[in-house]
Image (cartoon, rainbow, N blue to C red):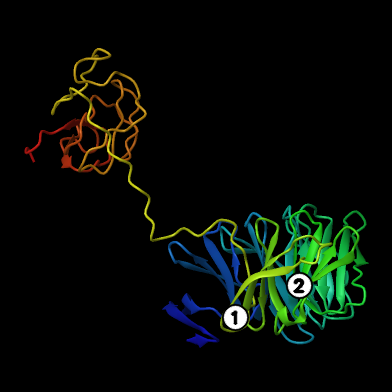
Amino acid sequence: FWFSNMATAYSVRGEQLVLDSVIGFGGTVPKGLQYHPNERNILFPLGSTVVIRDTLSREQFFLQGHTGRVSCLAISSSGRYIATGEETHMGFQAAAIIWDFETRQPLHKLVLHKGKVQALAFSPSEQMLASIGGIDDNAAVVWDVQTGRAICGASATNEAVHCVAFFHNTDNFFVTAGQAHLRVWEIDTQNRKIRPNDCQLGHYRRVIQSMVLDMNDEYLYCGTTTGDVLAVSVRTKLFKQLGPAKEKDRFELGVTAIDLLGNGEDLVVGSGSGRVALMHIGDMAGPDALRIVSSTTVMGAVTSLHVRLSPLPDPTLAPAAPAPAPPRPGARAGDHIPPGAAPRAPGNLPAGRHPAPVRARDAAAACWAQPEHAPHPCPGGAPAAAAGVPLRDGPVEHVHRHGPHHGRRAQGHLPRGPHHMRVLPPGLL
């Protein structure tokens, strides 16, 4: 089946048609593509389903519970919870669902908004969830994540609201932004109220469709439909700077996505024309604030930007193999550490744990020199007693004296079970 820009595969199990896999990505939901904090999974909506994709195993899992198209997606700071909202029809209720990421099961279904759930955001402690309704609703509601009950709410504005974000360092404040609208809300949980404080943008009148807070909750960076970025002081709630300074450098079709790099000094900005740019924040009082450093262009509009904190591993680079240990002077083929050997018998290693493993040319693992009956950290199985170790580079003969592999002999590998080891003379194999 084809849906938007995606192909989906179904299988029949009993009398049910079950979703098996998805190929492609629609990209119509703002901030719809997000990395999970474990940096192994990515999440994105597909119709009324949310896809969880494991980037290592390439397995796919699905969150299914909405009756309407998924309209927004939020992930808690630890990744324990996922929140999704849906879009229905005017006058009909639109639900938000809180999911448990590990079990992939819904925890609570939150039903208060009508028509559409526009945006969602978790508090830093993961105790609260803020939701914003669509143009037919425009309500701001704060929910208790543990119980699934509404704590407080209010009408956000008479204009459209596009995004919501909690502060990074407190659960008591969150921000909403939209058409000529930028408000900081204070949560009074004791009295079950939220109180708005408008930010003053001077003579600038903008439609804000994306925003990001810095990690210290000092500045708010807002992407607008006119193609510029506004910097607003969170403490004073006053406009500070606008960029890019030159009109010719502004983003065509508006700033549709924005995120902050881990250094706290640069922004990544995406536009409706497909332009992706690195923007240096700089000194807010200087002429070079919010300056574009570099940019590129992709096909289509940019609807999601999510900065991964750690770099992606390069699959073409394999870890370098450690150099083989040099042979011990005086070691001979077939030498062992006999039980009760003297600390430095000729050709033997002293009793005790040695930090460097003795590598064998054809072996897939190495054992440590140990006194008799000491715990033996073999990668092949449980700890065992070792009576001997290979002393020089060479093929390994591995003989199990007891345990589940009694009498079994293997060369070049270490099966599970207790064992003794010795080096075979060259040419014996």
Q: Amino acid at mark 2?
A: Val
Residue 130 visible to an observer of this rendering = no
SS class, disc 1: loop
Per the image, the residue denoted by label 2 is 111
Question: In the displayed structure, does residue 257 sit left or right of residue 326?
Answer: right
Q: Are marks 1 and 2 in contact (CB under 8 Å)?
A: no
Nearest the viewer among 321 and 122 is 321
Q: Position of residue 337 (x, y in %)?
A: 22, 21
Front label number (1 vs 2): 1
Q: Is residue 155 above or below residue 371?
A: below
Report which quarter residue 163 is drawn in: bottom right
Q: CA distance from mark 1 to mark 2?
A: 19 Å
Residue at 65% x, 57% y: name it. Answer: 262
Within 10 Å of disc 1 (Cα), the crowding (few <14, some 14-19, many 20+) is some
Relative side of 108 to 331, left or right: right
Q: Is residue 168 left or right of residue 310?
A: right
Residue 255 visible in the shown view = yes
Q: Residue 356 location, x and y as percent?
A: 34, 31
**Residue 24 sits above or below residue 339 on the image:** below
The total number of labels drawn is: 2
The answer to which image quadrant residue 224 occupies is bottom right
Which amino acid, mark 1?
Gly
**Residue at the image position 60 percent from the left and 57 percent from the top:** 309
Using the image, tell me which numbered label, if any, was put on residue 259. Answer: none
Give the mark nearer the N terminus: 1 vs 2: 1
Could you tell me which residue is drawn at 43 percent across and 79 percent down?
Answer: 12
- At mark 2, the secondary structure is strand
The x and y percentages for residue 259 are: 68, 66
Q: Nearer the viewer, residue 62 or 200?
A: 200
Q: Which residue matches tag 1?
A: 47
Q: In terms of depth relative to the viewer, which is nearer, 174 or 287?
A: 287
